Amino acid sequence: MIVVDLADSFNSDEELTIDVYYHGNPVMDPSGWGGFYFMSGYAFNLGVGFEDVPHCYGRVWFPCNDDFVYKAVYLFKITTQIEHKAVCGGELINTLINYTEETITYTWVINHEIPTYLASIAVGSYELQSHIYEGIEEDIPVEFYIYPGDSARTAESFINIDSVLSIYEHKFGPYAWNRVVYVEVPFSSGAMEHVTNIAMGRAFIDGTLDYEDLFYHELAHMWFGDQITCSSAEDMWINEGWATFCETVYIQYLYGDQEAKAYRRASHEPVIRYYPIQDGGFHALYPMDQSLTYSRTVYEKGASVAHALRGYLGDDLFFTAITQFLQDKSYTSISSYDMRDYL
């Protein structure tokens, strides 16, 4: 915590600007999941920590008010070795080469206010593979920052990405960001849904479709978690339960009703049989104890509740209401009560 003693008095409605200069060595979460990593010649962050409270993990690499409600716009200036690329969320607006020092500085901006945990960086020897997806409102760049030599297996693993984007747009409304980005990182325990810069473990981009549920769970976060964000860790099912529910949605419209029913039933069974044992009892989705913020109850029971809402309301009303909810609440933090009252 930094306490600033002001030399003068100010009125309560005056706006002050405070510059904070800082340095240090960013850390990882004690659990090993989350924080800032230097691995195998790459540097990257994962924006939440599973064990540390608060779970938001912007504070490991910049000064901030680290919760799910505080939001800011971002200007990133990342200087690295000249042979490396620095990839952040938002839009790349400038690159500046310093030939004397053999460095390059990348400047990225995010103009929508986002919470601290969705800000991101990845640095390494990346190659860019990209195409344009024709969205329902505008063309959207789809970009993959990948290791050299990974282009073929990336194309094969993500062969369905445009189809899934179309499914999500038609079911939940227009994509709310300027680009879709996956960046490969040397991490084998999952992925992280940073705004327009999804950190994806390289091991999962293996040239097969075996990890589509992970790819498109993270993509679904661009609607559930990024376009709207839970207002507290206790409301995490709004982020993770709904993104998990979206796995069934894309499977239904990509592979058919029977595949989707089988997937949902297989996901729902352990919600009833196993997770109450694993997570120490039957828990309401809100307020969830912070020791269970990233539990299977939050992910899978959250998905079951979203699916039950769909069944109760019927598809026409359900998808219309959720789409309007996302549009009306875009770029804000919402609680379980907010969602309940809106529906």
Image (cartoon, grey):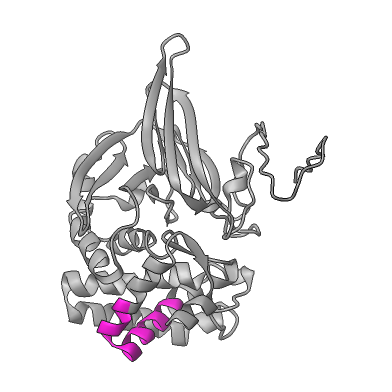
Q: Position of 334 compared to 128: left or right? A: right
**Residue 322 in the image, given as x and y percentages of width and height:** 36, 75
Residue 255 seen from this side: yes
Residue under the image location 39 percent in, 61 percent down: 221
Region of the chain picked out in magenta, as a range: 302-320
* Residue at position x 29%, y 74% in the image: 248
Taking depth in this image into account, of 323 and 300 the one nearest to the observer is: 323
Q: 95 or 159, which is in the foreground?
A: 95
> Seen from this angle, which residue lies furthest bottom?
312
Question: Along the line of sight, which residue is nearer the eye, 69 or 165?
Answer: 69
Query: As displayed, is residue 294 above or below residue 277?
Result: above
Across and down, in percent, residue 262 comes to 26, 81
Q: Does 307 appear above or below 66?
A: below
- The answer to whether any part of residue 245 appears in the image is no
Q: Is residue 314 magenta?
A: yes
Quadrant for residue 190, please give it: bottom left
Q: How many marks?
A: 0
Instruction: Give the dominant element type of the magenta stretch: helix, strand or loop.
Output: helix
